[in-house]
Image (tube, coloured by chain):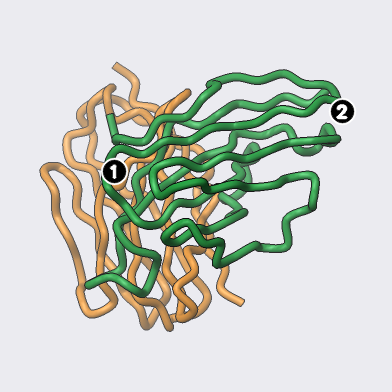
Amino acid sequence: ETGVTQTPRHLVMGMTNKKSLKCEQHLGHNAMYWYKQSAKKPLELMFVYSLEERVENNSVPSRFSPECPNSSHLFLHLHTLQPEDSALYLCASSQERWGYGRGQETQYFGPGTRLLVL
Amino acid sequence: KQEVTQIPAALSVPEGENLVLNCSFTDSAIYNLQWFRQDPGKGLTSLLLIQSSQREQTSGRLNASLDKSSGRSTLYIAASQPGDSATYLCAVMDSNYQLIWGAGTKLIIKP
């Protein structure tokens, strides 16, 4: 295991529901990331947090709302999603945010949450 | 804008064969290139990281090469095994410290 856990592993929700994805890392890392992986497409970076502060938001729709209460936990709050938001949502962590470490830091990924929006 | 391409999208080979996976990128101004493995229902696992100043990295039966000038990297897998079946992803870190990902090559090793 990589030391990064995600819950739930699978989620089905309607377009009017509100749900949250949770990520926890046990590696003592300072940076955490949310990615979206759609079928046969490259990973899309959604959010980056460094020391609990959001440093990047890659033009993600406001129906996705991240929260990082401490350096070990990361949430992705979902509301009024669209069917095209169905995808695998991956969380990752690294010792430091890109470019701030000794070398470009390897990211450790969780198993992902498979989301289906009906 | 940096773009990363992996061809083929899928590959099926008999067990025991040596094989090469390809990754190409459009902008040679990169900090590093990484190869990841993704198993069904699981997250990504980093296999090899090549710094921009390096030409190759090796780990067990895996060897990754980097040719920045031509914008290419290859992942060589020796003596393939059914356990090597997975999707292999290539990612480059560009000059803005952004990881740019390829769509992956799905590899099936037939027993």
- For the C terminus of chain B, the image quarter is top left
Position of residue A88 relative to residue A36, above or below, is above
Question: On the image, numbered disc 1 is attached to which residue?
Answer: B19
- Which hue is chain A drawn in? green
On the same chain, marks 2 and 1? The answer is no
Question: On the image, numbered disc 2 is attached to which residue?
Answer: A15
What letter labels the chain drawn in orange? B
Q: Residues within 10 Å of mark 2 (few under 14, many from 20)?
A: some
* Numbered disc 1: secondary structure: strand
Residue B13: % across, % down: 35, 30
- The amino acid beneath tag 2 is Met
Q: Residues within 10 Å of mark 1 (few under 14, many from 20)?
A: some
- The amino acid beneath tag 1 is Leu
Q: Which of these two is toward me, B50 or A91?
A: A91
> In this image, A118 relative to B3: left or right?
right
Q: Chain for mark 2?
A: A
Q: Residue at x 44, y 51 (%)?
A: A32
